[in-house]
Image (tube, rainbow, N blue to C red):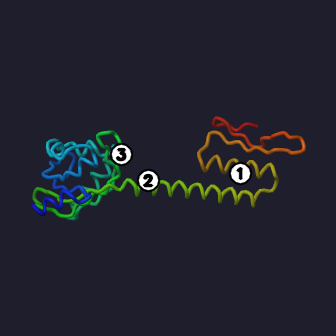
Amino acid sequence: ARYKDLVEKIPLVIYMCEPGVDGRWHYVSPQIFDLTGYTPQEWMDDPTLWYSRVHPDDRGQVLESEELALAEGRMPKLEYRLIARDGKMRWVDDRGILLVNADQQIVQGFIFDVTSRKLAEEQLTKRLAELQAVHGVGETLIRSGTLYKLFFDTGEQIRLAFNANNVLIAIHDPATNLIHFPYMYENGERVI
């Protein structure tokens, strides 16, 4: 009773299952509902539920990594996206920790939600790309020989760094109060 109480209260999904596309789930803790919207009974009743919930882009790598680990006598350590009942995606870290029965390959393990970490990594990657773009513009400013070349090179750096379809560089002439566009890239085409 104490063990069951512990397993059902820790913030991880504890499981025991057979590996593979249609591996049967022998046990899955109640936290699976909070993570996926599916009850433990649904997981145990439908051996294909897990595979159907793994994001299609991750399925091949997940199965290959699982098969390789088990063939080498190791426990699988996987990171992939699960699609919840509501359609939202959750990044999970799925770790097998014990091979209960080597003949049948029944694995015990745990799954925990790493969505927040993955989102933070994506934001950091995006920020790094932005900083590299700013650095590229700075380098362009240093290398440019003419003002026209400076505008062109800067516009190209911005367009390529952000994969933009529209980039306009505007210059205001205070003497005439007119705005001039030395660099225009609209709808995926350079405008002269």
**Residue of label 2:** 119
Q: Quadrant of the N terminus?
A: bottom left
SS at mark 1 in the image: helix
SS at mark 3 in the image: strand
SS at mark 2 in the image: helix
Mark 3–mark 2 distance (CA, rounded to whole Å): 11 Å
Is residue 76 shown left or right of residue 127? left
Q: Percent from the top left, x then y, of residue 15? A: 18, 55
Q: Which mark is residue 89?
A: 3
Mark nearer the viewer, 1 or 2: 2
- Quick check: marks 1 and 2 in contact, CB under 8 Å? no
Q: Give the class, few, some or many, for how many residues have Cα within 10 Å of label 2's Cα (few <14, many ≥20).
A: few
Q: Give the class, few, some or many, for how many residues have Cα within 10 Å of label 3's Cα (few <14, many ≥20).
A: some
Of callouts 1 and 2, which one flags the residue occurring earlier in the amino acid sequence? 2
Q: Which mark is residue 90?
A: none
Residue 35 or residue 17, whichever sits in front: 35
Q: Amino acid at mark 3?
A: Met
Q: Amino acid at mark 1?
A: Thr
**Residue of label 1:** 154
Q: Amino acid at mark 2?
A: Leu
Instruction: Tell me: residue 21, above or below residue 98.
Output: above
Quarter assignment of residue 2: bottom left
